[in-house]
């Protein structure tokens, strides 16, 4: 008897179907249906259901395949940022029952922030954990230059509230669309930036004149240093220690925890507690990868990132209670009122006016400033 597709019953060979093999089970059941000469409409109805079951099992098995995520950051292994990534790695492994593996690359092993963002955009890197300041360094992320304005944010709570506010949501969505990079969470306090020097302390704005200082690759920071009369230099963070030691630059503007964890106190004599720029560590993921993840996996990644950011905040706050006492044993620490912060603020007045409406949307600065 000829059945669908011209296949004859005698053409079906006796095959003993392996137990636990859904596809062979489907074939075996289909053969049995045909051999009993069931009504063909009913037979193919049953076969269709079995096929859907088989495909469902196949897709489920595929969904359980192991996912490996490489995550890069620029900090050393003693820094709270690295500790937070280790927490993230462990949480992802636990929450996914080992299905997801996160490999951490600290100390700029995969390059500077801008280089790692480029790798994410080309599909050569899955994740980055770094400051929200750095997102402004790539095309499409320019509005985040506002996060590097000196003395704009009163504290971590103020900065966090601003970046997670309703008026910042469309800015984030547009930046994600243009950069093809997903901002998973903006959560994780970092020590506010200060200033360290090799040969002379800074007490007031005029003392910046002629200072060879390494700064972050931010147009806002560069504009600030130029307005103060300094000579800003671009040096990769991974090369900063040697640049300070050899005199390529005489100063730098990272925070106290970085000065301690990266041992910059060995090549610097003075630390000025300006606390002039704040940042928040942020988990980033390549957008195409984020979209491929299931909703459940996205929620799992978000949860792990959020809790890891909270962990970094705890570590940072703890370190800030002891870091200045430590630095005082290695350096001369200059603090207000001996450090005249008001003179620096006045010198910077109007330095960023040209960025309003170009780097970030017009009116955003006022919204941030007015936020209580």
Image: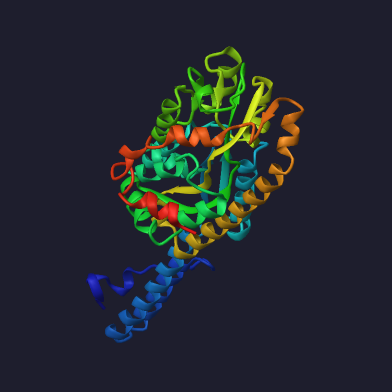
Quadrant of residue 92 within the rendered picture: bottom right
Where does the image place residue 338, in percent across and percent down from the top left?
64, 31
Quadrant of residue 94 within the rendered picture: bottom right
Residue that appears at 58% across and 12% down: 246
In the picture, measured across the screen, residue 290 lies left or right of residue 96, that is left
Residue at far left of view: 6
Q: How is the image coloured?
A: rainbow
Nearest the camera: 311 or 53? 311
Where does the image place residue 313, in percent across and percent down from the top left?
63, 50
Nearest the camera: 76 or 359? 359
In the picture, measured across the screen, residue 318 lies left or right of residue 290, that is right
Query: Would residue 221 be seen by someone viewing this image from the given angle?
Result: no
Count of labels shown? 0
Q: Is residue 292 above or below residue 221?
A: below
Query: Would residue 323 be seen by someone viewing this image from the given angle?
Result: yes
Q: Is residue 50 above or below residue 256?
A: below
In the picture, measured across the screen, residue 104 lies left or right of residue 118, that is right
Where does the image place residue 253, in percent across and percent down from the top left?
55, 30
In the picture, measured across the screen, residue 372 lies left or right of residue 143, that is right
Rendered-image quadrant of the N terminus: bottom left
Nearest the camera: 288 or 335? 335
Residue that appears at 36% across and 81% down: 46
Residue that appears at 37% across and 78% down: 49
Where does the image place residue 107, in percent across and percent down from the top left?
58, 32
């Amino acid at each position: 008897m000829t059945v669908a597709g011209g296949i004859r019953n005698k053409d079906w060979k006796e095959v003993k179907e392996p137990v636990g093999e859904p596809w062979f089970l489907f074939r075996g059941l289909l053969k049995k249906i045909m051999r009993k000469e069931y009504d063909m409409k009913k037979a193919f109805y049953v076969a269709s259901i079995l096929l859907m079951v088989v495909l469902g099992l196949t897709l489920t098995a595929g969904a359980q395949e192991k996912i490996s995520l490489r995550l890069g950051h620029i900090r050393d292994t003693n820094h709270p940022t690295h500790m937070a990534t280790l927490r993230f790695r462990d949480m992802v492994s636990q929450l996914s029952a080992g299905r997801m593996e996160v490999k951490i690359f600290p100390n700029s092993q995969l390059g500077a922030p801008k280089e790692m963002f480029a790798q994410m955009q080309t599909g050569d890197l899955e994740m980055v954990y770094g400051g929200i300041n750095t997102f402004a360094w790539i095309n499409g992320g320019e509005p985040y230059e506002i996060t590097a304005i000196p003395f704009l944010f009163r504290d971590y709570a103020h900065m966090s509230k601003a970046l997670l506010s309703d008026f910042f949501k469309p800015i984030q969505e547009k930046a994600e669309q243009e950069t093809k990079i997903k901002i998973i969470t903006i959560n994780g306090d970092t020590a506010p930036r200060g200033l360290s020097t090799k040969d002379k302390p800074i007490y007031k704005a005029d003392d910046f004149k002629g200072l060879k200082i390494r700064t972050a690759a931010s147009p806002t920071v560069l504009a600030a240093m130029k307005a103060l009369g300094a000579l800003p230099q671009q040096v990769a963070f991974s090369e900063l220690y040697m640049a300070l030691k050899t005199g390529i630059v005489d100063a730098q503007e990272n925070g106290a925890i970085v000065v301690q964890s990266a041992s910059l106190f060995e090549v610097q004599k003075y630390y000025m507690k300006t606390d002039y720029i704040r940042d928040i560590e942020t988990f980033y993921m390549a957008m195409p990868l984020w979209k491929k993840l299931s909703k459940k996996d996205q929620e799992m990644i978000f949860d792990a990132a959020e809790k890891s950011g909270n962990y970094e905040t705890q570590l940072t706050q703890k370190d800030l209670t002891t870091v200045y006492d430590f630095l005082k044993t290695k350096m001369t620490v200059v603090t207000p009122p001996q450090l005249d912060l008001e003179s620096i603020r006045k010198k910077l007045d109007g330095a960023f006016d040209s960025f309003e409406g170009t780097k970030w949307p017009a009116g955003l600065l006022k919204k941030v400033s007015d936020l209580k």
